[in-house]
Image (cartoon, grey):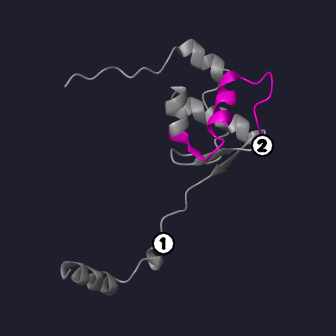
């Protein structure tokens, strides 16, 4: 299998898109954080911001936004941080997994397993 190099885009374009920033106000964004637009794009907005607002009319994961824009995750997180700070989007983090104390007891799981095997 031949691996192709990852295309991260033109470095000059990425520098321009982020305004030279390499880190932004990410506010705890991860790959599966859902982003929802709170407003429509306005005239004079950066084209990437406009596209994000259009994409996020319905909840969209950060990783999906990055794929659609064909930009690295770090760049997308910077752009999302800008929109979040301006109140143009809302970020919804997924529910955390159940705490250890909330997990079903092993005896119950064994009974379920036995029941499944008997089917």
Q: Residues within 10 Å of mark 2 (few under 14, many from 20)?
A: few
- Circle 2 sits in a helix, a strand or a loop, which is it? loop
Q: Nearer the viewer, residue 55 or 105?
A: 55
| Residue located 64% across and 21% down the image | 17
Residue tagged by mark 1? 99
Residue position for label 2: 87
Mark 2 or mark 1: whose residue is earlier in sequence: 2
Residue 39 shown left or right of residue 13 in the figure: right
Quarter of the picture containing the N terminus is top left
**Is 64 on the left-hand or right-hand side of 103?**
right
Quadrant holding the C terminus: bottom left
The one nearer the camera, 114 or 102, is: 114
Q: Which image quadrant for residue 77?
A: top right
Q: Could you give the CA–CA distance between mark 2 and mark 1, rounded to whole angstroms?
A: 32 Å
Q: Which mark is residue 117?
A: none
- Residue 53 locus on image (x, y percent): 68, 35
Viewer-proximal residue, 8 or 37? Answer: 37
Residue in the image at 68% along x and 29% along y: 49
Residue at (61% x, 18% y) in the render: 15
Q: Is residue 109 above or below residue 66?
A: below
In the shown orientation, is residue 113 left or right of residue 28? left
The image quadrant that residue 44 belongs to is top right
Q: Nearer the viewer, residue 119 or 95?
A: 119
Q: Is residue 27 left or right of residue 65?
A: right
Residue range in magenta is 39-63
Residue beneath the point at 34% across and 20% down: 5
């Amino acid at each position: 299998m031949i691996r192709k190099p990852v295309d991260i885009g033109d470095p000059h374009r990425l520098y321009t898109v982020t305004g030279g920033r390499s880190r932004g106000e990410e506010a705890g964004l991860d790959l599966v954080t859902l982003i929802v637009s709170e407003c429509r794009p306005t005239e004079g907005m950066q084209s990437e911001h406009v596209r994000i607002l259009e994409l996020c009319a319905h909840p969209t994961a950060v990783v999906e936004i990055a794929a659609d824009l064909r930009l690295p995750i770090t760049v997308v997180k910077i752009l999302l941080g800008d929109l979040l700070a301006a109140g143009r989007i809302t970020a919804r983090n997924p529910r955390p997994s159940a705490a250890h104390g909330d997990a079903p007891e092993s005896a119950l799981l064994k009974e379920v397993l036995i029941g499944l095997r008997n089917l």
